[in-house]
Amino acid sequence: MPKLTVHRGARQIGGCVTELRTSTTRIVIDMGSPLPGPEGTAPETALSLSGVTTPGEPCDGVFFTHNHGDHIGQIGCILPEVPLFLGETAQDVALTLYHRLARHDVEGCAPILAALERANTFHPGVPLTVGDLRITPLLVDHSAFDAYMFLIEGEGLRILHTGDFRNHGPRGKALYPVLRRYVGQVDWLICEGTTLSRSPHPIMTERALGRRAQTIIQKHRHVFVLCSSTNIDRIAVFTHSTPRSRPVVCDGYQKEILNRVELRNGDKSPFYRFDRVIPYSSRNRKLLNWMADQGFLMFVRANDRFRQRMESYRNDCVVLYSMWSGYLDGPCANPDLAQFLDGFPVIRLHTSGHAEHATLREVCRILQPRRGIIPIHGDQPEVFRSLAPSCRVTCFKDGEMLTL
Ligand SMILES: [Zn+2]
Ligand SMILES: [Zn+2]
């Protein structure tokens, strides 16, 4: 029978590392770094795994659900002989991000870039065979673009690993049909539970967020947006919420990310076409005149260059803060961010990248896990029991092994 070990992430959000082994095959899903702790402190990140990060029993592959740091952050620690797998656009976006970080002399980028370069890519719905396991990546809606669930079949069992997901974003309506059509009943459901410790109330959809953005953009001529450069859906929502008469502006790095996404996805959906997003240049007279005439929406990042650019609009602008509120308030707040926003009128406009309680409940109802549910990526996994009372919910500790 296959054996499962959640090396990290059994009782915390992020830093996920899950291992599955059969009698002949050993795979790992995600190799993430824990999320930053209080005051931006970096918690212990190095997870040593024999055969994966240090010589030992061979590993047949590490599969990445998506490119958020809490799932991919330790990719650079993986031994070069271990095959790596991730989505094509996820790879492109991560390469662009880490090349930029490397240019800014951020430590540890070189091994991450080398690992990303050598990674194999997979395609939605196309199964891969690794040893005696068949792994089918299923595209899901999440705040990282090109995110996947994995349906893993082997030794007579069907297991679904959800990665991070939601159904309140632009691709969300596909979730239930995909699960019904391509997955059906499973033996085990390894499911993210980020929101288990949060309110059970419905979460604002990206569509509703777009409507709010539209109202704000109509009211203010100069709109700055602070959101993750890799939250493509959010960038698309803000872009499409801006009237055509107004320029949407970003910097060269952000434009490069958007170009990468558009190249592989723009022909599938106009939502992922970003031709109207213009890289800012102080030499582009036409753009500067347009911005002066019509106002603008500008994607910014918390650094001195953007702060200087924003300074002259201080009394006639709004900053849309579109990231997790915990970076601004509470024990994990980042003081640099508060300083960057100091003195500017800020409107918070954000929604979660994770499934709300009702979605988790419906996923369990569709999949009817025969043997049980294993919650990961959540700090209160026990709450899952109230969402799926007819299923066995197995909560365990990091490093514990379970025979499936
Ligand atoms: Zn995550
Ligand atoms: Zn994520």
Image (tube, grey):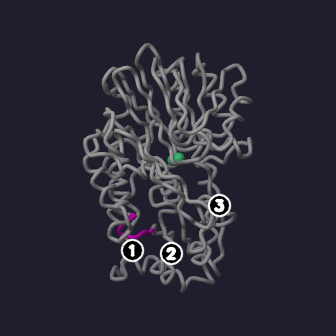
Q: Residue furthest top?
A: 156
- Mark 2 CB in 8 Å range of ligand 2? no
In the foreground, 63 or 90: 63
Residue 45 rendering spot, x and y as whole percentages: 48, 54
Which residue is under mark 1?
280
Q: Is residue 250 magenta?
A: yes
Q: What residue type is labelled 2?
A: Gln
User: Is disc 1 surrounded by few (<14), some (14 to 19) or many (20+) residues within 10 Å?
Assistant: some
Which residue is under mark 2?
294
Q: State whether residue 13 is above or below residue 223.
A: above
Residue 242 rendering spot, x and y as whole percentages: 52, 62
| Numbered disc in front, either 2 or 1 | 1
Q: What stretch is highlighted in magenta?
A: 249-254
Tell me the distance, in whole angstroms, between the alpha carbons under discs 3 and 2.
Answer: 30 Å
Q: How many labels does the image show?
A: 3
**Residue 266 appears in the rendering:** no
